[in-house]
Amino acid sequence: MKITNICCIGAGYVGGPTMAIIADKSPHIKVTVVDLNEPRIAAWNDQDVNNIPIYEPGLSDIVARARGRNLFFSTEVDKAIDEAELIFISVNTPTKTYGTGKGMAADLKHIELCARQIAKVAKNNKIIVEKSTLPVRTAEALKSILDNTGNGVQFQILSNPEFLAEGTAVEDLLSPDRVLIGGESTPQGMEAIDSLVEVYSNWVPRERILTTNVWSSELSKLVANAFLAQRVSSINAISELCEKTEANVNEVAKAIGMDSRIGPKFLKASVGFGGSCFQKDILNLVYISKAFGLNEVADYWEQVIIMNDHQKKRFSKNIVQTLYNTVSGKKITFLGWAFKKDTNDTRESAAIYVADDLINEQAKVALYDPKVTHNQVLFDLNYLDTRSSSENEKHIVSFDSPYEACKNAHAIAILTEWDEFKDYDWKKIYDSMLKPAFVFDGRNLLNPERMKEIGFIYQAIGS
Ligand code: UDX
Ligand code: ADP
């Protein structure tokens, strides 16, 4: 089937950027991104492309080029489903917060709602593509719903997990290491795979498009994220050992990374990984392993999360201990709230957990993040449900200027590795703080010698 009309359900961090690139690279395909969230769609349609709801370097230019030509954002879900030959499902699949599998399994209610809606609306054969990260064998559930509730229409289900990382989404989409497409090995399945391969072939070299069976594709996504997260937890475990010895984690990372079998990437010690995927996907892997009775496998992967939680906890604990065992009433300034630089996404950011710990200790947290709004910060803290929202509001204040945020602070904690933090006038910041002035660098971002020369008591992860 030659694809001329694509619908994507879900205009979030995955659906929005991915569809913008497909539309930009395939002017002959009409791409409509739909979402139930009206303000979100309105923001995607904002006259000023700088106001689109997702910040990714390079994305607004691409949206400006394709929007209104062959890229559309809409809340008319049924219409877009009806018109499309191929439908991507890019809705969120958070960890369940209730019932069986609470805190572990993926919540698939949004996926199921999409399937039921597609089944209700579809009048001709369609290819359904799982783009959201899903537990293995979700395609089976999707197929069952579609085949049993539809109007006799034929559906082919493909798994096409997204490997883009936030902050580099445009780059990752334009030249992916690989595109993975899983489908059934029946003639109809192969035909569906070929249709999607053709879409990506508009800009991705054929040898980088990998086709597998559905289950391998679904599992590969979880495993890729688990391996990446495992590397971060591994180096973070070593960072604690470095702090107890004379070793420096940056030097260790460099030395091991030069072994071509290990490689240099993803070896940066940090205050802990965040983001919507790592924790969720590992919990998923743990959950399905347990479901099959593979307890050793489950425990092995769970340790990656345990280590990550420990890393966040020990960062906040160290701040309290270093500040003479009390932060009560003290102004502690956070630089950064996003889970990594170059994104406004804050899901599972280490900053949220460190702030929560310090607020428990009655600290006054001041915050500057170049891209995150104060509403989002409050939302993140309230979501933890540790205390009332009015209590949270009393304990955290956001500033528009980093210099104002740092004024009269006892300590600064660096939670996100935004490049601009390196270029601040640190002498000016030092002069405006209470003394002794502490910096806790959770990202190994600043130059230790320079910071100590200015007069800071400077502590970084892993040294
Ligand atoms: C990840 C995967 O990289 C991507 O392929 C998948 O599609 C989605 O999940 P993302 O969560 O956007 O992407 O960001 P990533 O760059 O992987 O970083 C995840 C977290 O690990 C961040 O909090 C980051 O700061 C942290 N990290 C990463 C480290 O602490 N040290 C490192 O060396 C690398
Ligand atoms: P991701 O990082 O996976 O892209 P997001 O939360 O950023 O996750 O985006 C998912 C989007 O999917 C949200 O904007 C949400 O409103 C949308 N969504 C969830 N369920 C449905 C549904 N049944 N129909 C349409 N949109 C949906």
Image: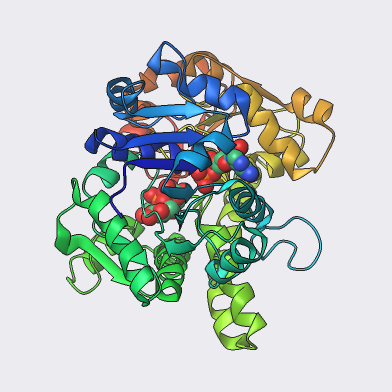
Question: Which image quadrant for residue 449?
Answer: top left
Farthest top residue in view: 47
Q: Is residue 306 visible?
A: no
Residue shown at 37% from the left, 40% from the top: 5
Along the viewing direction, whichever of 241 and 227 lies nearer the viewer: 227
Residue 421 vertical placement versus 361 (above, below) = above
Q: Estimate the x, y position of residue 92 in percent, counting from the top left.
A: 58, 48
Q: Is residue 204 left or right of residue 132?
A: left
- What's the image's color scheme? rainbow
Q: Position of residue 52 (x, y in %)?
A: 45, 22
Q: Position of residue 363 (x, y in %)?
A: 71, 32
- In the drawing, does residue 320 fall left or right of residue 49? right
| Residue displayed at 41% across by 11% down | 48
Judging depth in this view, the residue of 83 and 453 nearest the camera is 83
Q: Is residue 432 above or below residue 143?
A: above
Say whether residue 228 is visible: yes
